[in-house]
Image (cartoon, rainbow, N blue to C red):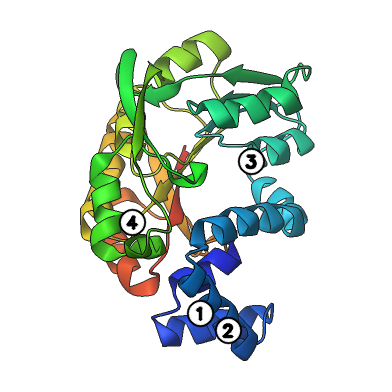
Amino acid sequence: MSYISSFISNFNNRSVYKESCTKSGLIPMKMLTVCVNLARFLRLYNVIYTISLVLTNIINRRKLIKFYSQFIAKGDLCFDIGANIGSRTEVFLRLGAKVVSVEPQNICMKKLRKKYSSNKQVSLIHEAVSDFEGEEEIMISNSHVVSSMSQEWINSLKASDMFFVSTSAFQWQKSAKVNVTTLDKLVQEYGKPAFCKIDVEGYEYKVLKGLSKSVGTISFEFTPTKEFIDLAMDIVKHLVTIGEVKFNYSLGASMTLALENWVSPEAISKILPTLSQKTSFCGDIYAKFI
């Protein structure tokens, strides 16, 4: 997630907002306040959010490449589950990886095909991933970055007013049936990935339930609400049944591992309930099989 969208999300939490703005030095406080208030008045959060994602991907590409280089080497296989318009696919390619890019949304797949259809290092899969093969419903947002297959996640966002959904910034007024596959099926067809990135807006547990064998390293997004922290803990329990695994995490778009050393499942299970106190925005949990 982008720094700018993080600022907007954290605006009502003045201490977090001020700290993040001061650390980044990206935008002066008064200017950002004016911009946020104007966006609130005009209900332009979805536009700002999407634009900020694009700008952040351009500005932070070097940082992203440096961060992911600790997990990915030239010639590695990567899965990009929930590829959206391919920002992580692009980074993985720049690191010399082969990428299986999976995305169910028509609008996003159209952009992915336009950019990567002739790239032999990319396999584009126009499906979603779950714990079964068949069909599933996706709730389509007016902003493709928050379309989700989890009604519970959408309800959680509305209840917490994350992304200011109460201002109609993001709406989920359409739905569609999409084909779904499993991680096990993808591994069977394409091989064992060195790195598997999962960003599916609250559907991460179902995705990882479809994995029965260890891979290299997995990243999956967490949402800092109680019900989804609980689901993250369920994911930890599931991964332990697959193989020996250690954990780390990052907050927001920091692209920095929060822990100096990777920790045990027991240790991360104690840390997870505290994350809602450290951030009001999404982050990522990293699971490395040993």
Q: Is residue 181 left or right of residue 57?
A: left
The secondary element bearing badge 3 is classed as: helix
Which of the two discs, 1 and 4, sits closer to the camera? Answer: 1
Which residue corresponds to mark 3? 88
Instruction: Tell me residue 246's x, y (percent).
Output: 41, 47
Which of the two discs, 3 and 1, sits closer to the camera? Answer: 1
- Relative vertical location of residue 8 with respect to residue 263 in this rendering, above or below: below
The secondary element bearing badge 4 is classed as: helix
Q: Are marks 2 and 4 in contact (CB under 8 Å)?
A: no
Which residue corresponds to mark 4? 268
- Relative vertical location of residue 173 with respect to residue 22 in this rendering, above or below: above
Instruction: Tell me residue 147's x, y (percent).
Output: 42, 40
What's the residue at 52%, 73% (across, down)? Answer: 7
Instruction: Tell me residue 288's x, y (percent).
Output: 47, 41
- In the image, what residue type sits under mark 1? Asn
Please tell me which of labels 3 and 2 falls first in the chain: 2
Which residue corresponds to mark 2? 34
Q: Is residue 93 visible?
A: yes
Q: Are marks 2 and 1 in contact (CB under 8 Å)?
A: yes
- In the image, what residue type sits under mark 4? Ile
- Relative vertical location of residue 229 with respect to residue 274 in this rendering, above or below: above
Instruction: Tell me residue 93's x, y (percent).
Output: 74, 33
Local crowd at mark 4 within 10 Å, few (<14), some, or many (≥20)? some
Where on the picture, by quarter, is residue 166? Answer: bottom left
Looking at the image, the residue that sits furthest to the bottom is 30
- In the image, what residue type sits under mark 3? Arg
Q: CA distance from mark 1 to mark 4?
A: 38 Å
What's the residue at 25%, 54% (across, down)? Answer: 156
